[in-house]
Amino acid sequence: MSYLEITGLTVAFPRSPAPVLRDIDLHVARGEFVSVIGHSGCGKSTMLNVVAGLLKPSQGGAVLEGKEVNGPGPDRAVVFQNHSLLPWLTCAENIRLAVDQTLSKTMSRAERAAWVMENLALVRMTAAADKRPNEISGGMKQRIGIARALAMKPKVLLMDEPFGALDALTRAHLQDQVMQIHAALGMTTMMITHDVDEAVLLSDRIVMLTNGPNAQIGEILPVTLARPRDRLALAEHPDFVHARRAVLEFLHARHANPALKAA
Ligand SMILES: Nc1ncnc2c1ncn2[C@@H]1O[C@H](COP(=O)(O)OP(=O)(O)OP(=O)(O)O)[C@@H](O)[C@H]1O
């Protein structure tokens, strides 16, 4: 049995003529980094929300370490595109809140305080511990959001376009940081993205969804590039170029967005 299993997943929303997702099967190994890519509206967030336990599937569902997902839980931390930090708390307090909610039975107060600082250091944000979210940049807020998620010691990290709202340079910097953290912690990760280069750079496998409704997994591309991965060295690496091309081909030739085609 795989660590995280999505089996026979079908999601239909009320008043929609057809299911968004139909019969999705995906098995993710422990420590694996999987990206999900597909055109806007195909159902990527829907899939992630089922794994997060935020959405009830119509059929099938997700099983994590043999336990059926039937609601949100601290074993699955979610990072959204917009940081969702509480504005009246400092960065450290935002993380502390999540740590207190999830780890108060297993860690003393002092251990939790140290753990918050450790996670701030992990995303190189120690200096922002006492700042409020409105005092730091968008990229910094995302880093705090990632630190908060990791501080909960989740079994699975779920990221829904975590870098989507950032400029290209900040985005590249955060991608590198997430790769370093993944190398250090080996957390099982599912990330939704629209960015083909990002998917290739970060992932062990890229799951490509067909257009909805009735979206399915069209193809899964294993990315066998050795780690650690260096974006500059890889830019012209034949395996990187080949993987990038395969995803682009899927998205823009075989499964072009019909709405965009017509425009
Ligand atoms: N609560 C809901 N009720 C009805 N329809 C919904 C609901 N949530 C999502 N949908 C529809 O389901 C489809 C898939 O949405 P979803 O957000 O999963 O797509 P996505 O691939 O993540 O899109 P994007 O890349 O634009 O974020 C869309 O057509 C959307 O309008």
Image (cartoon, rainbow, N blue to C red):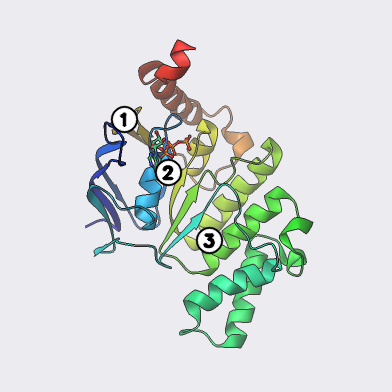
Which residue appears at 35% of the width and 52% of the height?
55
Where is residue 156, by image quadrant? bottom left
Q: Is mark 3 within 8 Å of ligand 1?
A: no
- Residue 42 vs residue 186, the one in the foreground: 42
Residue tagged by mark 2? 45
Q: Which residue is mark 1?
A: 213
Can you tell which of label 3 and label 2 is closer to the viewer?
2
Disc with the residue nearer the chain's start (3 vs 2)? 2
| Residue neighbourhood size for the residue with mark 3, other residues' Cα within 10 Å, grouped as few (<14), some (14–19), many (≥20) | few
Which mark is drawn over residue 184?
3
Residue sticking out furthest to the top: 262
Mark 1 CB lies closer than 8 A to ligand 1: yes
Residue type, label 1: Pro
Q: Earlier in the sequence, mark 3 or mark 1?
A: 3
Q: CA distance from mark 3 to mark 2?
A: 27 Å
5, above or below 242, in the image? below
Residue type (three-letter) at the residue carrying disc 3: Ala
